């Protein structure tokens, strides 16, 4: 497997701490032209791109190792099993989980949350119980709870968000109730970029004996995620937000909780023995992995997390933060532009609107300039409603974005203003 | 890709100052349109005279394409019969989705939407108002027979 671009050696103070040109060279798609112009990809919060080490790891697996896992005695099956379980160990290390028994492979964040809602929720919740979320959640951390509430009679509560996009922690505390059975919150808001005070949230919830699920979809590529330091009970994320392929994700769960939870889906791989009347379930984590898993996806995820480790999470974070600062300052200076979400603690996501121009028009005009951003409600309609908006334009940054990308974004926005003068 | 093809002067003008904007208080029928992709919302209210749309208004929020398309639509269908509107809708639909086909009839100012066909992601923006109008017409009471 090829090594990812190295972080630049410490240079003069003015020099960037991060060799973005070398990082960019790892991502083949970034050399594409869109409408005759070099691609500027500012939609990593929706899905990030994949570096060569990930593509090569998947290719190597598919061309040299593939067979079904946990089954055959033949060599390929053993190699495939090793590759799959090795990826699990990489995830464990990346999250600093205690054991690979706590790492369940799923399709993505959405499936991870649905797993908890169904397996943990349906057994334990009853009428009058409460699940506490926040107003800025992605639909994936709202709808599964609505469904389990409808099935059990439990009630979904949402802690409010201040106008700048910060969680109202006092209101959150007040909503923690003797009947609160679970807290489920985003680590980072996808629509606004707000980094939530998850450590404080966990502390408050645990003080009342309430377990906490963190939706890490937007955090995994940008924040240090140490599940032991966070002390969370569940942590969900998707591979494709952290430079891995789509269709693979992870549910971390505290072993004592996972152990007590029933399987969610039944089938092969999740059993030890099956009779016609009853079956014995497999151990953790396979108890939750019914059917043949996404083996090559897991291999790709392992390679992606190693890529991030090699670049250095701290270095990536610092690079993205400097882009966020520059872009925020330059966008805020534009006439008629309004930033949506200005919390002090933010990941590299900028949501904005321009008076008199609908975000979709902004998106189309930027696309014609080769600049890819997201426009719409970002699958977070409740927080959009709070701002009285149907949609925003959103630029999000990843390890491969550069200051030139911000220049191109600003040039594109000048075109928007010209056309909609 | 030519942005000027999409954002023609007529489109920008109708976006800036939409015609027939608002709602009819004495409407015979109304319908709400919603584009879940972008959260755009649109309502159409209309008054019938026999088989004809005597008057109509639209309101809502949306992108330049959806607002201009709705504004142009209200101008184009006012005074027309259900059958004429159905035919016109067929022509507009073809204009929005099929770059190769020349429109059969004279679409007048609606031709300003011709550029949308180059932008598949935006076809729904331009057609939302027509779906909403069709829903309102389906709900409208059938004209009373004078025989």
Image (tube, coloured by chain):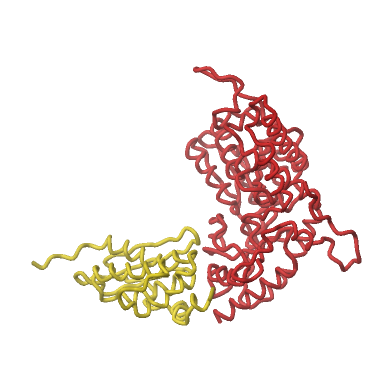
Chain colours: A red, B yellow
Q: Residue at x 57, y 72 (%)?
A: A365
Instruction: Measuring from the top left, give residue A351's x and y in whole percent.
Output: 63, 64
Place of residue A178 in the rendered image (x, y in percent of width and height, measured from the top left): 61, 38
Q: Is residue A310 left or right of residue A127?
A: right
**Is B131 placed left or right of A226 in the picture?**
left
Q: In the drawing, does residue A175 fall left or right of residue A64? A: left
Q: Residue furthest left?
A: B147
Q: Residue furthest front?
A: A63
Of residue A200 and residue B38, the one placed in the foreground of this image is B38
Q: Position of residue A109 (x, y in %)?
A: 61, 45
Q: Is B6 above or below relative to B128? A: below
Q: How many marks?
A: 0
Judge whether residue A251 can be spotted in this image: yes
In this rendering, is residue A226 above or below B56? above
Q: Quick check: A167 above or below A16?
A: above
In this view, the residue in front, A25 or B88, is A25
Residue A294 quadrant: top right
Dividing the picture into quarters, in which one does residue B136 lie? Answer: bottom left
Q: Is residue A204 visible?
A: no
Where, quadrant-wise, is the C terminus of chain A in this rendering? bottom right
Q: Residue A7: x, y in percent?
A: 84, 56
Position of residue A212 relative to residue B51, above or below, is above
Q: Nearer the viewer, residue A117 or B70?
A: B70
């Amino acid at each position: 497997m090829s090594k990812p671009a190295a972080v630049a050696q410490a240079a003069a103070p003015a020099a960037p701490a991060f060799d973005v040109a070398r990082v960019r060279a790892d991502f083949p798609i970034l050399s594409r032209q869109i409408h005759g112009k070099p691609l500027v990809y500012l939609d990593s919060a929706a899905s990030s791109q994949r570096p060569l080490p990930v593509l090569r790891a998947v290719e190597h697996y598919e061309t040299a190792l593939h067979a079904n896992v946990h089954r055959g005695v033949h060599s390929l099956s053993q190699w495939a099993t090793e590759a799959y379980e090795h990826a699990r160990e990489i995830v464990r290390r990346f999250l600093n989980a205690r054991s690979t028994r706590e790492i369940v492979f799923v399709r993505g964040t959405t499936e991870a949350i649905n797993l908890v809602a169904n397996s943990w929720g349906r057994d334990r919740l009853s009428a009058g119980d409460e699940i506490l979320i926040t107003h800025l959640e992605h639909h994936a951390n709202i709808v599964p709870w609505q469904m389990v509430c409808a099935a059990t009679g439990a009630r979904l509560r949402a802690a409010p968000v201040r106008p700048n996009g910060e969680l109202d922690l006092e209101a959150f505390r007040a909503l923690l109730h003797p009947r609160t059975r679970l807290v489920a919150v985003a680590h980072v808001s996808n629509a606004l970029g707000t980094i939530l005070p998850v450590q404080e949230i966990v502390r408050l919830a645990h003080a009342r004996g309430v377990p906490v699920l963190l939706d890490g979809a937007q955090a995994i590529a940008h924040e240090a995620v140490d599940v032991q330091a966070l002390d969370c009970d569940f942590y969900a994320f998707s591979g494709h937000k952290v430079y891995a392929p789509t269709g693979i994700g992870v549910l971390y769960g505290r072993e004592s909780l996972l152990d007590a939870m029933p399987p969610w889906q039944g089938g092969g791989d999740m059993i030890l023995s099956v009779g016609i009347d009853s079956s014995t379930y497999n151990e953790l984590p396979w108890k939750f992995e019914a059917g043949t898993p996404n083996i090559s996806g897991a291999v790709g995820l392992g390679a992606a997390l190693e890529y991030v480790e090699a670049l250095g999470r701290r270095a990536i974070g610092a690079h993205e933060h400097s882009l966020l600062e520059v872009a925020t300052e330059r966008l805020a200076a534009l006439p008629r532009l309004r930033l949506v979400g200005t919390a002090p603690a933010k990941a590299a996501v900028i949501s904005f609107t321009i008076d008199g121009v609908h975000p979709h028009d902004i998106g189309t005009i930027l696309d014609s300039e080769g600049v890819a951003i997201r426009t719409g409600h970002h699958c977070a309609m409740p927080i959009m409603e709070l701002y009285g908006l149907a949609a925003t334009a959103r630029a999000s940054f990843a390890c491969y974005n550069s200051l030139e990308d911000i220049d191109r974004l600003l040039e594109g926005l000048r075109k928007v203003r010209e056309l909609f003068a | 890709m030519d942005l000027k093809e999409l954002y023609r002067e007529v489109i920008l003008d109708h976006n800036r100052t939409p015609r027939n904007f608002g709602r009819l208080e004495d409407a015979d029928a109304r319908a709400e349109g919603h584009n879940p992709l972008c959260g755009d919302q649109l309502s159409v209210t209309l008054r019938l005279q026999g088989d004809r749309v005597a008057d109509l208004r639209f309101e809502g929020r949306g992108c330049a394409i959806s607002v201009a398309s709705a504004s142009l639509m209200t101008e184009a269908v006012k005074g027309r019969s259900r059958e004429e509107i159905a035919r016109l809708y067929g022509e507009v639909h073809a204009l929005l989705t099929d770059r190769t086909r020349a429109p059969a009839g004279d679409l007048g100012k609606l031709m300003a939407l011709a550029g949308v066909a180059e932008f598949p992601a935006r076809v729904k923006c331009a057609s939302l108002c027509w779906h909403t109008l069709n829903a309102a017409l389906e709900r409208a009471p059938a004209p009373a027979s004078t025989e």
